[in-house]
Image (tube, helix red, strand yellow):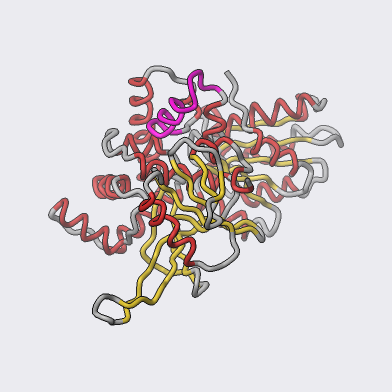
Amino acid sequence: MEIKRDSYLNSLIRKKHNGITKVITGLRRCGKSYLLFNLFKNHLLAEGTDSSHILEMNFDFFENRQFRDPNVFHPYITGQIQDSGMYYILLDEIQMLDDFVAVLNSLNSRKNVDVYVTGSNARFLSKDVVTEFGGRGIAVHMYPLSFAEFISIYPDTQEKALTEYMLYGGLPQIALMNDPDEKTSFLKDILVETYIKDIIRRHKIRKKDELNDILNILSSSVGTLTNPTKLSKTFKSMKQTAISKNTIEKYIEYLCDSFLIDQAVRYDIKGKRYINTPYKYYFTDLGLRNSQINFRQIEETHAMENIIFNELKMRGFYVDIGVVPVNKTNQAGNGVHVQYEIDFVCNKGSRRYYIQSAFSVKEKEKLTQEQRPLLLTKDGFKKVIITKDCLTPHYNDDGILIMSLLQFLLDKNSLDF
């Protein structure tokens, strides 16, 4: 069964023949190779491209290890360019090719070559795409399945699909499995043997338990404001041993670079400035998060917030945590400074949305609590509350759009209702 990833495929198609390298980044096993070697390749063939003009290489394969040497790979690949027709070069796990920037720039200097590559390390690739490629590389970031992609192959109801998605996440292999035990085993194995092992090997980490403990703490505090200092104190109270703030910062950086987690920064809406710390951390795939904590602490409120964050990122928004500072007078008549939080401030071009994630707003008191920070912004940007409640999207008397989580996830234009 084929899962369509049309948004990513169309992004590649739009960038064809633009003279620069297309770099597909993202979490391992999120579907980058399938996008490149199946969906995009099939598009090329359907358009009439001769198969001899599609040149492929997976640097992750054992049998291709000799091609990781640029002095071997470059003459090999250029030797297959036999005429003036357009050649499409598809390369998987490009970070395993030594001096890959120079190799790709050399290939791109040919007028009849169009280059597409995948990579799984943010720091390694994004830095090179921006700087060393000198404008000759562009990133297409890929995520695990969105809920809309997930449900396209799910055989049961939308409600059951959402429960599965919250529990097991959106890795394509998981979506194609039916047995819960098989899903659980796959997630635990891939987390340890692929993601964690890759981080340990790449960064030469000696104290593996420390990395695992930090990942446990982050897994248990999804959507909670934290920082390395706070994590250091938590680590000490839990493990009765010390781990430095600097070490924690490095571990979090490694986890972000591998695309396992993503960081959201606080933004002062009134002061129009970013606040350095604390941050919030969300998992790129909830199944991996749940696997890390052995499928305990599956709070729907936190899972829902994580899913909304990921969906917004998939739709191309820059996502921050909103802070609305307000000066109030307490019962003693003294002035106090209060900060209200908006779950997400989303920006794309000239558009901005303020979004609250609320499990339920059926109680009037809860609705008042959720919309208070939105109203305190006192600006004209659109304000949205997304709830697990089953309801029809509507605007309330305060001009706030209220919609269900399913409506938000299934309609990519839902925020413009």
- Is residue 97 in view? no
Q: Position of residue 179 (x, y in %)?
A: 38, 17
Magenta residue check for 17? no
Report the number of discs. 0
| Residue at image point 60% right, 64% down | 380
Magenta residue check for 164? yes
- Is residue 87 in view? yes
Q: Position of residue 88 (x, y in %)?
A: 74, 35
Q: Position of residue 293 (x, y in %)?
A: 28, 38
Pick the residue in front: 202 or 261: 261
Pick the residue in front: 25 or 302: 302
Q: Position of residue 100 (x, y in %)?
A: 60, 47
Q: Is residue 308 above or below residue 45?
A: below
Question: Seen from this angle, which residue lies furthest bottom?
Answer: 334
- Part of the protein shown in magenta: 153-169
Side of 214 where 308 appears, left or right: right
**Main SS, magenta residues:** helix
Which quarter shows the C terminus?
A: top right
Q: Quadrant of residue 291?
A: top left
| Residue at image point 56% right, 53% down | 126
| Residue at image point 71% right, 25% down | 42
Q: Quadrant of residue 43?
A: top right
Pick the residue in front: 384 or 48: 384
Side of 20 where 250 appears, left or right: left
| Residue at image point 51% right, 47% down | 402
Question: Seen from this angle, which residue lies furthest left?
Answer: 240
Which quarter shows the N terminus?
A: top right
Q: Is residue 173 above or below residue 236?
A: above
